[in-house]
Image: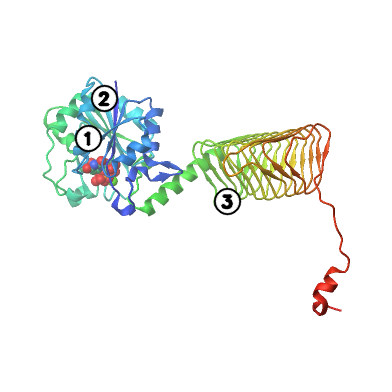
Amino acid sequence: MNKVVILAGGQGKRMKADMPKPLFKVLGEPMLEWVISACEESGLSDICVVKGFMGDMIDEYLGGRYQTVLQAERLGTGHAVMQAVPFLENDTDGHTLVLCGDAPFIDPTAVSEALVIHKQQNNAVTVITAELDNPFGYGRIIRSATGISGIVEQKDASDEQKAIREVNSGAYWFKTADLIDLLGKLQCNNAQKEYYLTDTVSIAIAEGKNAGAYKSENPDIIKGANDRKDLLELNTYARMAVINKHLENGVEFTCLDGVTIERSVEIGVGSEILAGTILRNGTVIGKGSKIGPNCIIDNCKIGDEVTLNNVQAYDSSIDAGVKIGPWVHIRPGSHIKSGVKIGDFVEIKNSTIGEQTAVAHLTYVGDSDVGRKVNFGCGTVTVNYDGIVKSRCTIGDNCFIGCNTNLVAPVKLGKAVYTAAGTTITKDVPDYALAIDRGVLKINEGYSLRKLKSKLDK
Ligand code: UD1
Ligand code: CA
């Protein structure tokens, strides 16, 4: 079976952070995740990640999804792959893809097409290359009549070699058995005193084996990040690639300021995304919806013809025709059913809101099951937490909740219950009843005249 070794041992000193470089995020996902997903899309699942600097964080991130091996000392890319030899030795019949964990845009097409050439040419190693306008810093590809004869690193290159624009992407296919053999022959007699994986090319050729190169049409597969500026560039590049895909699918954007859409997001045709909108984590939006300005929508399912204006919503479903905003927080576990209207300064948490219910302003609904066509007066609060446990409120269809009602959970309102303004509900109310909780209103006439006396304007 074909295998993958992903090199993720680098520290990325210039990032200035206590974190392995491959865990820095591009569009909300670690670079390592982009690389892994390119493998998965190419049908490769036998993956070993070589960790080094703060390697525990890599294990923690992967959560056992793939195996890892530790490179305790950082002695070069060849040395990094050597650590994976026990993984390679499990099955030496197939081919092994080596990738860099900090080059997120490796392309599944390049991976599969390179493998085809690798097999056709019967190569021990096939390097994935690309041509760059500015090849500085990369290993240069030395071509020969039959294929390639070697890779020369920037620090070891002559002036003539430095002029070569075809560079090593850092991704390669090897015959697994040849890779194990070639790793054993690497030496570190170069400018950086490292075991260069790139030397496998010249060693293979010296042994009479074939080495080749697959040149990708897409130079972006090489893009990596050495510092925060590079990381911002990768984010900008990925962000525009995603937005362009949605533009092609018929999504409307009139201003991209502050718009960030992760690649896992789906948006239906005719929807409009306004400025300041961040869509994350597999959010799905239906057709003809209008999202923004200034929304964060994280792991939500949004129906057709929904309007969200200045809304933050997390781990929730919002059905067709709902209008929410401005300034609303939908917290995890909520289901807002079709035709609901939610207005300014409302928070909904872990609650179901039935069809066509209105929660117009200044209201908190937490841990509640609300029926259809309920009207919430301004300032309603579900009192769902007593300091120890959280309890639920149930509100029947067609209830009319007066302004400033407190519902002390657990409590249940039947169908079409009225609550009078300012009422605190502490026990269940049956269908069709009015609940009213008021002291006797006293009016003390002339009170302020007596109290303030000379302070009052005459
Ligand atoms: C390497 C290639 C170069 C290529 C470039 C593409 C070598 C000698 N050179 O250069 O030809 O153009 O990648 O980006 O291979 N890593 C480890 N352990 C180590 C060293 C590196 O895990 O001891 C990992 C890094 O985390 C990174 C990858 O290997 O993911 C590449 O390492 P890096 O130092 O960036 O290689 P370059 O010198 O840039
Ligand atoms: Ca590099």
Q: Is residue 33 visible?
A: yes
The answer to whether any part of residue 141 appears in the image is: no
- The residue nearer to you, when weighing 192 against 152, is 192
Residue under numbered circle 1? 81
Q: Amino acid at mark 1?
A: Val
Identified by mark 3, the residue type is Gly
What distance separates the C-alpha of mark 2 from that of mark 1? 14 Å
The x and y percentages for residue 341 are 73, 41
Left or right: where 55 falls relative to 418: left
Q: Could you classify mark 2 by the number of other residues whose Cα lies within 10 Å: few (under 14), some (14-19), or many (20 or more)?
A: many
Could you tell me if the residues under marks 1 and 3 are in contact, i.e. CB atoms within 8 Å?
Answer: no
Looking at the image, is mark 2 or mark 1 earlier in the sequence? 1
Is 368 positioned to the left or the right of 432 in the image? left
Residue pointed to by mark 2 = 95
Q: Percent position (x, y) of residue 105? A: 39, 39
| SS of the residue under disc 1 | helix
Vertical arrangement, residue 241 with respect to residue 134, above or below: above
Q: Which residue corresponds to the image point at 14% horizontal and 34% vertical from the top-left?
A: 203
> Mark 2 belongs to which amino acid?
His
Q: Position of residue 325 (x, y in %)?
A: 68, 47
